[in-house]
Image (cartoon, rainbow, N blue to C red):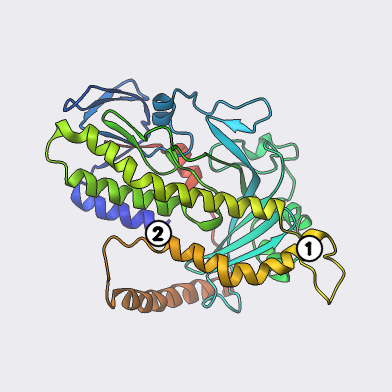
Amino acid sequence: PDLQEILIDECSKLKPDFIQNGNPVEGYVSKGKGKGVTVNLADGTTAEADILVGSDGIWSAVRAQMYGEEIKQSSGDLKKRQGCTYSGYTVFAGETILSTPDYYETGYKVYIGPQRYFVTSDVGDGRIQWYAFFALPPGTKRAPSGWGGSERDNQADPEENLVDYIKSLHEGWSDEVMTVLDSTPPDSVEQRDLYDRSPELLRSWADGNVVLIGDAVHPMMPNLGQGGCQAIEDAYILTETLAATKSTAKLENSLQDFYRKRIFRVTIVQFLSRLASDLIINAFDTPWSPHDDKGKSWKSYLTFFWKPLLQYAIFPAQFAYLYSYFPSGNMGDLPEYLEKTWKAKHFQAAEKVFAEVADGKTFDSGPSFFKNAEVEETVEA
């Protein structure tokens, strides 16, 4: 992902070897005030640091030790996994290069139907990334999981065309959905079950000289696109808090301060994200329309009347809160300048790719970021 590459490049300028791959954290020993932490790594070696930041995702090894969990341990019905609850959704994901009539005007689209929804997002260079969410039981595996899970040859039908399967679940939907799916190589489709956690209101994110951030402690449904955003906010506030800490003896208290600073806002965002997900499963249906007879249930009428309320009240209030956080203060004309610059670069890059595709060039989707992460687990110390 572009943002990740930017962050890695900037950090590498400060310390070229700051990132080490393939040797994940398995545990830690917090040694008390001012004495730092010993980090236990997968290859049997250890590392010493003033603090350990557990940013190792939803199946966090750091959180497992802090909260007494077993990594990826699941209940028999798969509705619980390492302290996380199944959301009710499984998601298929894919990426394609496609020039749509509104490619430059519409960066994000959501198509909602009964117990499912389909999302497309412009991710640059002519690429469209899509996600298909379905209210299916956990463990309903039809595709390999680039996020760490089953492989294609482990599926019930390894030869199944996954694009055709997903299209069959969107029968009667917009042609725009079908166009995106038809342009996607079936072998590039991935899947995972979605889990999240309740806010940790009664347990701190910190244990001595160890602290959790991001999905390691507050994973959330992707409906509002806030998983990565809240992790970045965590990192900013943690950096700000540590910068104001004048001695290592005060680090433990600073990490507790960080938790108290973040828990209120993160709890609200987790609630809003889960609410949006639950509403789609439980309250939305094909909306009633005077032009057809597809939506006739009570949920269809409810969905019809929801539309103006969502558009003019709920969505504006929701996004006003999400965008209310700007710790750097007023940036003046910078956002406008960045938008103008980005639009020009985006147009040039996308048109170049569209022209190459028109000339017959093909692009391999390659392993996803999640698949790469599975192979090259990362440790930062």
Determine whether 235 is above or below 149 in the image.
Answer: below
Compared across the picture, whether 87 is left or right of 264 comes to right
* Residue lying at 32% horizontally and 78% vertically, measured from the top left: 337
What's the mark number on residue 300? 1
Query: Residue at the spot x=73%, y=50% of the render?
Result: 161
Residue lying at the far left of the rendered structure: 246
- The residue at the point 67 percent across, 55 percent down is 280
Residue at left 32%, top 35%? 211
Does the CB distance between marks 2 and 1 fall below 8 Å?
Answer: no
Asked if residue 93 shows in the view, the reply is no
Give the residue at mark 2: 2
Tell me the quadrant of the picture where the N terminus can be found: bottom left
In the figure, 186 relative to 317: above or below? above
* Quadrant, the C terminus: top left
Distance in Å between CA atoms under marks 2 and 1: 40 Å
Which residue ends up furthest to the right in the rendered image?
293
Judged left or right of residue 299, residue 16 is left
One can see residue 89 in this view: yes
Secondary element at image label 1: helix
Q: Quadrant of residue 32?
A: top left
Give the tally of numbered discs.
Answer: 2
> In terms of secondary structure, where does tag 2 sit?
helix
Residue 248 spot, x, y in % from top left:
15, 33
**Lower position in the chain sequence, tag 2 or tag 1:** 2
Q: Position of residue 298 (x, y in %)?
A: 81, 60
In the image, what residue type sits under mark 2? Asp
Which sits in the foreground, 369 or 3?
3
Quadrant hosting residue 208 = top left
- x, y percent for residue 95: 57, 58
Q: Amino acid at mark 1?
A: Ser
* Nearer to us in this view, 203 or 82: 203
